[in-house]
Amino acid sequence: MACFLVSATEAVLVTVVKKAIESKEKAPEEIQVKFEGNTLEKGTKIRFTEKLKWLGNMLWGGSALLAFEHVWHGEVVPWFPFLTAASDPADAAEMLHEMSTVGVSMAVLVTGVWGIMVWVSSVMEKNAQKPMKA
Amino acid sequence: MTLLTTVFAAIICTIIWYKTAPKSEMKVGTLCLMYWGASLMWLVDAIFEYAELQAEYFTPAPADMLNDFFLGLSVVALGLIIWLGILLIKDPKGVVKRTLFKTE
């Protein structure tokens, strides 16, 4: 009914947090990375804001495509109150229930998958890097 | 069917991204993440629907399946349109800028 709104709200928050961190973030650390055959190349670590962008893209993209699905099913309309369920109290209660169950689960799963991506990338960074000697 | 269509779109995009990475001139990574985000969200939707319908979930009416497939294709098309918009606005290869300002 309006489950995508939970993810869309999280997407807004992630974008705001990303903008706030971006201005304070230090320049990425230069490292040496080991590749196949023990070859070494210079590189920089991925900034945390770059990783936050992954979450933002998943949340924004997913919410936009789900919003389209809701338009397709007539649950979102281009006139006030925009959500067809919002005009009837019984439907509105059902909508809120769906948001608190399906919507929250969607946001949690996307954030969880992002967390795994960040963890895996950190492990890969640690395994591949060799600090540069001054 | 919508979930399946989006998952296939996400897999194809990820393969294209892997082939072209680490260069991100075409911003395929953004498209990948968009499709994966939507796929995860529809997966949750499918789990809740399965919990409600049980085995009936796997035997949808042909008309519903066709409608869902049509929706899936439309979702993929919308994703591509959003990606195209991002690509033209961010213009990582400077093509739009060069066309607008006719640099030599």
Image (cartoon, rainbow, N blue to C red):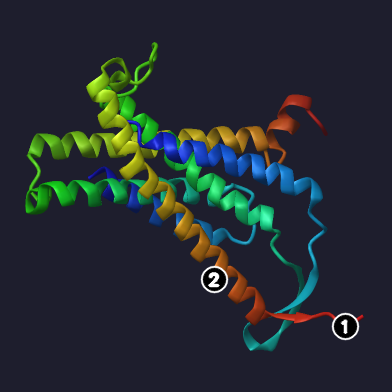
- Please determine whether, in this image, residue A84 is positioned above or below residue A64: above
> Considering the numbered disc 1 on the image, is that residue within a helix, a strand or a loop?
loop
* Whole-number angstrom distance, CA of label 1 to CA of label 2: 26 Å
Question: Which label is found at residue B93?
Answer: none
Q: Is residue B45 left or right of residue A57?
A: left
**Image quadrant assignment for residue B64:** top left
What residue is shown at x 23% (from left), y 48% (from top)? B48
**Image quadrant assignment for residue A42:** bottom right
- Please rate how many residues cluster around mark 1, counting C-alpha atoms within 10 Å: few if below 14, some from 14 to 19, many from 20: few
Question: Which label is found at residue A133?
Answer: 1
What chain does mark 1 sit on? A
| Residue A132: % across, % down | 83, 80
What residue is shown at x 11% (from left), y 47% (from top)? B53
| Residue B40: % across, % down | 37, 51
Q: Is residue A81 left or right of residue A84?
A: right
What residue did someone put label 2 on?
A: A120
Q: Is residue B46 left or right of residue A5?
A: left
Q: Which of B1 and B40 lies nearest the eye of the viewer?
A: B40
| Residue A14: % across, % down | 59, 44
At label 1, the amino acid type is Lys
What residue is shown at x 36% (from left), y 49% (from top)? A105
- Please rate how many residues cluster around mark 2, counting C-alpha atoms within 10 Å: few if below 14, some from 14 to 19, many from 20: few
The N terminus of chain A - image quarter: top left
What residue is shown at x 49% (from left), y 44% (from top)? A59
Q: Which of B74 and A92 lies nearest the eye of the viewer?
A: A92
- In the rendered image, the residue lying farthest to the right is A134
Q: Which of A71 and A40 lies nearest the eye of the viewer?
A: A71
